[in-house]
Image (spheres, helix red, strand yellow):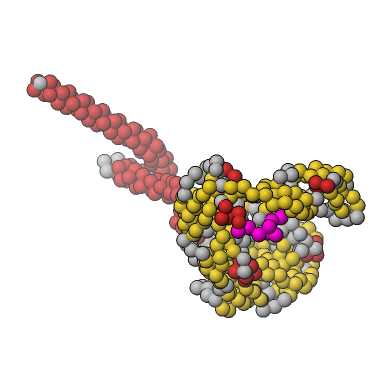
Amino acid sequence: MMNSRMNSRMKKKVIAMKMLKKIFKSIRNLFRLIARFIDKFIITPVTKFALFITEKFDKQAGKFEKWLNKKNTLVFVSLILSVLLFFYVNSHADTVMNSSAEVLRNQEVEATYNKEAYVVEGLPDTADVTLIGRTIDLYLAKQLSTGKVTADLSGLEEGSHDIQLNYESPINSVTYKLDPSSITVYIYPKVSVTKTITVDVINKDKLDSKLSVQSVTIDREDVIVKGAEHTLDKVATVKALVDIGNIVNPSAGVNTLSDVKLVAYDKDGNVVDVEMVPDKVTATVNIESYSAEANVKVIPTNIDNIAFGKAISSITTSVNTIKIYGDEDAVSKYSDSYIPIEVDVSGLSENKTYTVVVPKPEGIREVSEKTITVKITLGEEVTKEINDVKIDAINLGPNLKAGAVGVNSSKTTVILKGTKEVLDSIDPSTITATVDLSGLGEGEHSVEVKVSGEEVKANYSAKTRTVNIKITKS
């Protein structure tokens, strides 16, 4: 084991020595090349030049030849020429090596023209600028903020024009290229119209669920819209976008929103780019908190699917009333009525307690109780019949009248199922039988009879399932 390690080390040393020899050989060859280069391109030309001078100046030939034949003369002359050559090449190499390009993207284009009299289309908002030059110059050009892309439209009249974009570079040694460099613009005379402002309230859902927006008013009714005539023709409406989310700590009472943005739309709801004076308005938002106490009413569904021989005898809830918050009309409606809560009793065979979510009807945004418990008690089912319940037609089309065909088509017998106590408490006058004639035209039709009543613990059905109705023009 020790021998293998020693052999491995010896091999590494041998390899290292070989590598060093190769490196030294490469360095020696490099110096030889340099010496040959100096001899060929510096010493030999200098010697020839010296001989030429010697031949031309015979009188000084002796002294000059004696000086030139000194051992160190040619070495110093070659050295000086080499240094001069080095600095010359280095300066040019530095210029080539350090030249680069930098792209300034999305530079704003500033146009010069009479903005009060004309509208310009086709003018880009931004352009890309490619700067070319030395690295240090590019760095300075980026740091300075004076550079900008300009389009000079001054003096141009109505019509189509091809123009060049220009870039005012803060550094003269930097060249540039623009993308785009040339554009086609269309100049139109600016006209104006007056439009009525409508209010559009957005982000109502960011308002506390117990609060409601009662009204919104703005400090002006009209706005002056300016632009090209063909663009103004597209404007169908101007809306003040009142963003409820911008109200800081909204509360019941008067809230003010400044700098409400005005936006112009076409008939399809697309934004139209026009100038508006003013472009913003101030809105006054009146926020109220409407609330009331509302009853809860449990309505069991699929009551006919309760276990055979069973019926609902009682329904009790953990709360009988809840507090509701929302729009004024909705709060008033449900405070005089009730909040319906449906409970599916399919397959119910014994007493059971349900936990149900309290729904929020349209216009109601908050309820005081999120869930309630509902206890349903069962009893023995009995059957009872109510005779001669009149059948009423509903949803009959305009200019039409309906009549029953046959004696048994105007009245029906209603079959009630439930516990004896529940059925005995039902007032027959609260039972209704109807046929739905929606979508039916002239002629004789067989329609289904539907029966309902106010007692939700009972099951209602018509003994006569269908009746014949004749529809004629009125």
Please state the extent of the stretch shown in magenta in the rendering: 425-433
Whether residue 216 is visible to the viewer of this picture, yes or no, is yes
- In the image, 438 versus 223, the foreground residue is 438
Q: Residue at x 81, y 53 (%)?
A: 396
**Image quadrant in which you'd find residue 392:** bottom right
Residue 157, quarter of picture: bottom right
Answer with left or right where residue 183 lies relative to residue 46.
Answer: right
Name the residue rendered at 59%, 45% in the picture: 304
Query: Percent x, y for residue 54?
Result: 39, 42
User: In the rendered picture of this protein, how many numbered marks are placed on residues?
Assistant: 0
Residue 18 higher or lower than 116, as above or below: above
Q: Is residue 139 magenta?
A: no
- Among all residues in the image, which is located at the extreme right? 473
Q: Residue at x 10, y 21 (%)?
A: 1
In this view, 25 is above or below 154: above
Task: Name the quadrant containing residue 282.
Answer: bottom right
Residue 66 drawn at (x, y percent): 30, 43
- Residue in the image at 52% along x and 56% along y: 315
The residue closer to the viewer here, 399 or 279, is 399
Residue 412, how many percent across, how many down?
Answer: 75, 49
Name the residue nearer the viewer: 387 or 57. 387
- Can residue 394 be seen here? The reply is no
